[in-house]
Image: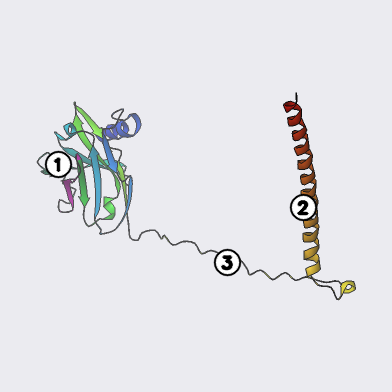
Amino acid sequence: MEWPWLFLYLSLHITGCQKTPPIFQTPPRIIALNNSTMELVCALKSEQFTQSGIYWYRWSKEIQDFQYVLFSNVFQKHTITNNIDKDRFNVSKGSFRHTYTLKIRKLQPLDAGTYYCAVSHSSELLFGNGTELSVVDSLPSTEKPTENTPPPTKPVRCIIPAKMKGSSCSGFIWAPLVACAVILLLSLVAAIRRFQRLRRRLRLHFNKQVFK
């Protein structure tokens, strides 16, 4: 890798070219099929960054090198490097303000890499956050894993001991219910008695206050 590209890579990934990036790229990652068409969007915060044109670079993991892709000026005229197919790469201004789209047609495996848009401002090259492009022959499967259905539950049977023949399961069910009903009735009676006592006390207290 040549020294100028090494300096460019280090300034982009380690120190950063600016504190607040004025350029935002979307999406951050794309997985596209071979021989398909893909678009990268570069959004600028201000129109002043577009006066000198838009640069596009690509970082290739395979060759570990930065590659200059193309340059598009304010008149939408492109300057493309010799190792890039001019018929497949194109830059156009987006429908939104200060957005530019890089379109790549008939994708090939050699197009894979991380693409960065950049602008020249105050004698400084400002870069976007980058978009990683992966070119594959088939997209990853999105099928949901099969869910294991639980085995059917067996009905619960009431087993009656031999000594209790002639009785049924209903006796075991009603006995607790009757006991709960009796307890609730006794609690209700006790609450009524307490309420009556409290009511008597309040009447006596009221009468004492009146006849004083």
Residue at point 51%, 64% (across, down): 146
The disc, 1 or 2, on the residue closer to the chain's N-terminal end is 1
Q: Residue 167: percent from the left, percent from the top?
A: 84, 73
Secondary element at image label 2: helix
Which residue is label 1 attached to?
72
Measured in 3D between alpha carbons, the distance from the residue under mark 2 to the one under mark 3, in whole angstroms, is 43 Å
In what quadrant of the picture does the C terminus appear?
Answer: top right
Q: What separation in Å lies between label 1 and label 3 (alpha carbons)?
A: 58 Å
Amino acid at the residue labelled 1: Ser
Task: Determine the secondary structure under disc 3.
Answer: loop
Residue annotated with mark 3: 149
Count of numbered tags: 3
Q: Is residue 141 shown in magenta? A: no
Among the two numbered marks 1 and 3 on one chain, the one whose residue lies closer to the N terminus: 1
Q: Are marks 1 and 3 in contact (CB under 8 Å)?
A: no
Tell me the number on the disc at residue 184. 2
Residue type, mark 2 in image: Leu
Q: Between tags 1 and 2, which lies in front?
A: 2
